[in-house]
Image: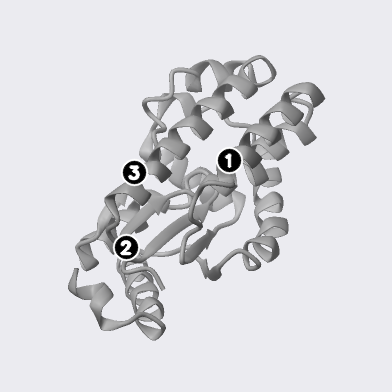
Amino acid sequence: MENNYFIGIAGNIGVGKTTMTKLISEKLNWQAYYEPVIENPYLDDFYENMKRWSFHLQVYFLSKRFEMQKKIFENNISCVQDRTIYEDAEIFARTLHKQGFMTDRDFDNYQELFKNMTYYIRPPDLIVYLRANVKELFSRINHRGRNSEKTIPSKYLSELNCAYESWIPKAKKITQVLEIDTNNCTQAEIELQAERIIHKIEEFCPPSIFER
């Protein structure tokens, strides 16, 4: 076993990954790595014209996620990551291709790039999958008020949810997966879920992990 622990927080847009990443990293005093959503220069254009910008958007996210994975490896400390690199290919690129927003050529090119990148990375020791229905996701998306997300099609969120449900059995072949239903959760309930995740880690980690 590594002398550090690596958690990936997975889930759809608006499900609460960033909040959970922050809670767990602060409770354990571990490094947090957040998804570079706001910094993505293609995001606004993508939601205006998904077919035109899907490949550019996903390549940017994949590049930044790989950069983050390098830091995780080089820093060699316990950490929590807001969205895993696997979701970029297995959920978002695949769904965009399925819905006709990414061409066969671009999707094949993207998958080859993803395959080459993931050969060199360390998978998380635990993936925490946060689940919520589309109505709940829209409520949270509207609450946080990002202008670029106001035009997200409900069909897109629904397809992403379906993609996550198909991917989770595959993820369990890569590492341990903890599934959590976050529908209708209060802030107090979210904090309790964070504690549950920490207890799960404690079940199969040496005490030295928490002393770092």
Q: Which mark is residue 187?
A: 2
Picture coordinates of residue 9, whole percent (x, y): 45, 56
- Residue depicted at x 71% and y 52%: 162
| Residue 102 vertical position relative to residue 182 in the rendered view, above or below | above
In the figure, is residue 62 to the left or right of 97? left
Q: Position of residue 181 (x, y in %)?
A: 53, 67
Q: Which residue is mark 1?
A: 88
Marks 2, 3: nearer the viewer: 3
Residue type, mark 1 in image: Asp
Q: Is residue 68 left or right of residue 42?
A: left
Amino acid type for the residue under numbered disc 2: Gln
Alpha-carbon distance for marks 2 and 3? 31 Å
Element class at badge 3: helix
The image quadrant where one finds the N terminus is bottom left
First in sequence: mark 3 vs mark 1: 3
Q: Is residue 145 above or below residue 34?
A: above
The structure residue drawn at horizontal position 36% and vertical position 70%, both measured from the top left corner, is 189
* Residue 137: numbered disc: none
In the picture of the structure, the residue carrying the numbered disc 3 is 71
Q: Position of residue 147 (x, y in %)?
A: 42, 24
Going from N to C along the chain, the mark reached first, 1 or 2, is 1
Task: Give the secondary structure at mark 1.
Answer: helix
Q: Which mark is in front, 1 or 2?
A: 1
| Distance CA(mark 3)–CA(mark 1) | 18 Å
Q: How is the image coloured?
A: one colour
Disc 1/disc 2 C-alpha distance (Å) = 28 Å
Residue type, mark 3 in image: Lys
Front position among marks 3 and 1: 3
Using the image, determine if residue 198 lies above or below residue 169: below
SS type, badge 2: helix
Quadrant of the image occupied by residue 151: top right
